[in-house]
Image: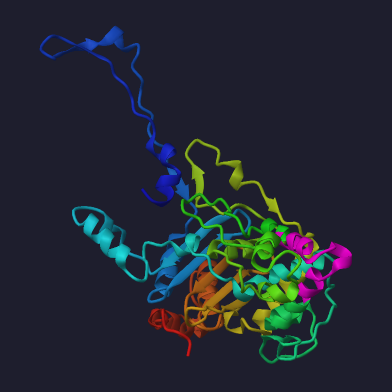
Amino acid sequence: DLGIERSYENILRGEKGVEILLRDAHGRVKGRYEDGRYDVAPVSGKNLNLSLDIELQAYGEKLMQNKIGAIVAIEPSTGEILAMVSSPTYDPSMLVGRERGRNYLKLNRDRYKPLFDRALMAAYPPGSTFKPTQGLIFLNEGIITEHTLYPCYHGFVSGRLKVGCHGHASPLSLLPALQTSCNAFFCYGLRSMVDNRKKYQSPAKAFNVWKDYLVSMGYGYRLGVDLPGESRGFIPNSNYYNKVYGENRWSALTIISVAIGQGEVLATPLQIANLSATIANRGYFYTPHLVREIQDTVISPEFTTPKYTMVDSHYYDYVVEGMRMAVTGGTCRIGAIPGIEVCGKTGTAQNPHGKDHSAFMGFAPMDNPKIAIAVYVENAGFGATYGVPIGSLMMEMYLNRKIAPERKYLEERMLQSNTIIYSGVKKH
């Protein structure tokens, strides 16, 4: 039993009935014991109504053919999961019937791990999709305002340490930093926070405050989706770094890569999609879930109670604006959908084992959003190459039920492309 069946087993199964019969010496039934007074009527299992949009799900699976990765789409106003794609996948009919055992072994040995549900179980470096969380933390903690400028000399430079960045205007404030996905801005922000002894006494204390914010945004622990096997991802705390570097032996520069979603930070595609839904809602989320309703039963309040982050909701307006700018004139330009205000954030996550991963997080429309999404394609290079097109095609299909003629070329390119060939290919 996998998936929904395992989570809702007791509801789907119902209860067996009991009938007590009288038999004679030959085992023939003679009637009911005490006219059936002790019989128990069976209770049939209850029907579940799922939130999956079946057409969107099928479309996502098509777009992810010949790719390794995941797509998760959520309706921000309810937390209902609209699509959850893990690729490569397998035909479920393989696990039914006589060949089941043999097929399971074959799938289990497949080096692309089709049985591994990447949407829930894979913990990836979130890369630049993590930057909105940083902007929100720095704003709420008073480390920056929306006007604070940081320089970017093709990256963040401090002594011998350099975190590279691509060319764009400098110095810049939060919104253009989100628009161009500037690494330096968020590195400076993290340093201003973690090394601020006046406010936090020590880097360790500052870092624990930082972590608490991320936990409130749904990172570092399981979200509690109604499916088995969810991974918790990983957000380090100061004890973790004390063990690695020694107590009081580390500072912001030691851990600077966490500012841009690299280093020790790991998140599942579900957590990244949930972050997108939280930004879409300007500061709260509902625990993501697949079961929309249970026949004659109230759905668990766990899924209908909003969870608020530690960040004031008005700060979310800046991040939404920055993510809108990324689509109108930044790293997500290819994700623009005619007639719909899309907000997005690319991510290109460095991968020590081979080619970079391509990621995207976004939602649409900007006001009163109907869909929030995360796309993660392993070994596919820049976020704008695969993550953004796939994410924006999914949103367009959901909102318009068709792809605009001027974007057909993009759909074609995504359907035809094969990135699985790069898996396990080391970078030069």
Picture quarter containing residue 181? bottom right
Q: Is residue 116 left or right of residue 358?
A: left
Q: Give the camera-side residue of 405 and 200.
A: 200
Residue 120 appears anywhere in the view: yes
Q: Residue furthest top?
A: 34
x, y percentage for residue 377? 48, 75
Q: Is residue 334 above or below residue 345?
A: below
Q: Give the camera-side residue of 395 and 306.
A: 306
x, y percentage for residue 130? 65, 71
Q: Is residue 73 left or right of residue 54?
A: right
Q: Is residue 170 left or right of residue 132?
A: right
x, y percentage for residue 409? 46, 86
Picture quarter containing residue 132? bottom right
* Span highlighted in magenta in the image: 189-211
Q: Give the camera-side residue of 427 and 150.
A: 427
Q: Is residue 192 above or below residue 52?
A: below
Q: How many numbered discs?
A: 0
Q: Is residue 19 above or below residue 61?
A: above
Q: Give the camera-side residue of 226 and 406.
A: 226
Q: In the image, is residue 198 part of the stretch drawn in magenta?
A: yes
Q: Residue furthest right?
A: 198
